[in-house]
Image: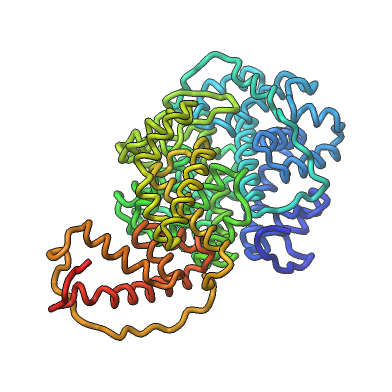
Amino acid sequence: MSFLREVEVPDSFGPFVALRESMGFVPKLFRAQTLLPRVIEAEAQIAASVLLKQSELSRTQKECILLVVAAAKLNTYCVTAHYQILRTLGLKEDQLDRIIGDHHAAGLSISDKALLDFALKLSREPASIGKQDIDRLRTLGFSDEMVLEAILMTALTNFLCSLSTGLGVVPDFAPWQFGDASNGGAEASSTSSEFEIPDKSCLYLRAIDRSPTDFAPFAFFQEKFGFIPNIFRAQTLRPDVVEAEANAVGTILLTQDVLSRFQKECILLVVSALNLNTYCVAVHCEMLRNLGVPPEKSDQIALDHSLADLSDTDKALLDCALKLAKRPAGFCADDIELLRTCGLTDEQILEAIVMTALSNFLNTLQMGLGTVPDFEPRLIFPLKEVNLSLSSSRPTLEALQRQQSAPEDPDAEIVARVQAGETEAFELLVRLHGRKIYRSLTGILGSTDEAEDAVQDAFLKAFTHIGEFEGRSKFSTWLVRIAINTGVQRLRGRKEIESLEGEDEEFRPRNIQAWQDDPELSYSKEEMRRLIEKEIMKLPVKYRLVLMLRDLEELSTAEAAAALGLGVPALKARLVRGRLMLRESLVPYFSKGGTGVTA
């Protein structure tokens, strides 16, 4: 069972046959992607090259990397699967439990502990990885080929964790239960060394010179991109892996039968910007430029796609990708359903999830390899400080936006005071925004008395959850969203109210007259708003709500549809009818020869 529908695939399907032969079963993670068999084929080839092929690291070492990185991400699916696989390789349950809880207490060799430390650091804080980390592994006897495999395994784990979370697959075995401190000891060990600024001046591992004339994957990249990205040049110690990655790029990124190439490049771009990955942002800005996207638009998509010139559907798609990449613990079936309401098919949603996972794979790989950008970066993501503690995170995209002169939130200082424990400061926020919230709720509820009660509810919810406010939008915007949800919930709780979900009746304007050239010549902006609000209040509630959310509170189509529990097409239809009704009601004021405002 997963978030998306599945289709039957015959037992003779090549990737499933290979998985049964190598693992003894076909993981549900792959069965959940049967809507796009070509994707399964590409993923199976990468898994075969990176995980299943006996090369430099042992299968046990690679499975342990998978286990500890997945445990650090609290990913039940991957931990459960690879816990069972390690049992079949001869490890005892008590040792596996110790590896998950604290691999330094699991009786592993010094070199294996260091290998897992490196994988955890690369997964959690990839921007902090430097040549020093590679050199530490070399001093313990790890060859460059072995380090490359460790980097690939960490990237593959991030890919599988993103994929399993996005698809919502249930474990193949009885789920492993997380305690309160999974990998706590391992995390402590990774922070025990003194603070270091990562050395990013050169490629960390040696590579073999390859030419497009004698190496097919490079010929493929040269043909498709016009250049060979450095991230693939850096992996020539493992040509089989480069070949699998080239196949994945061709199969997942370059196809256009489900999502467009533009949409997929945008997913790669926003996830790379979220991960502060200068290399990948530079590459995918260049890819978008080649697709005809102006550099300024690419920059805006990277910094804040909500302000870019994108469709509501594309914005919702990128919102979903960012949530899956940044807050996987909060990702759920509702996020999938929101994309469906935007008109996206399950095939398109599946490809978006796969693209998000692929973005995490490539980002992790690049950070571990230390490849330099192929192009002059327009956006640079500096590492201001390194903090490897579990409770902290690296600089966020929101912080980067502030660094790049994005408009500041005038409430930021007050919000920070409240979040720091100065609860009395919340009263300042109530005074600043109380009138706006009251006006919005009056428009939604159609009753001043009920709006007063709803205002109290909205501010109480905001106060209770202010610790969860991350600054991705202005505080006032976040507060309005809470007020809207509060008002809509109250509407749904009424026993006698016309249906919000009922069929829309046909509306034909009866009074069509030309307006005077510029209504604002007759009315001030404040008078205009009062007049429009007064006429909106006279509309049937289901049209009033749509106009309030879209035209007065300026929510996107997808946001308004989600707030009202409507599909995007239904919301758009109501918006058109509501605007026609409003226009007709305003004709007496703005038509030539109209009487004007008499109130």
**Residue at the spot x=65%, y=31% of the render?**
146
Name above or below for residue 117 compared with residue 165. above
On the image, the x and y values in percent for residue 189 come to 65, 19
Of the pair 528 and 301, the residue shown nearer to us = 528
Q: Quadrant of residue 444?
A: bottom left
Name above or below for residue 430 compared with residue 394. below
Q: Quadrant of residue 335?
A: bottom right
590 sits left or right of 412 in the view: left
On the image, the x and y values in percent for residue 167 come to 65, 54
Q: Quadrant of the C terminus?
A: bottom left
**Residue at the spot x=27%, y=60% of the render?**
530
423 sits left or right of 535 in the view: right
Of the pair 196 and 316, the residue shown nearer to us = 316
On the image, the x and y values in percent for residue 288 come to 38, 54
Q: Is residue 232 visible?
A: no
Of the pair 109 and 464, the residue shown nearer to us = 464
Name above or below for residue 209 compared with residue 554. above
Q: Quadrant of residue 448?
A: bottom left
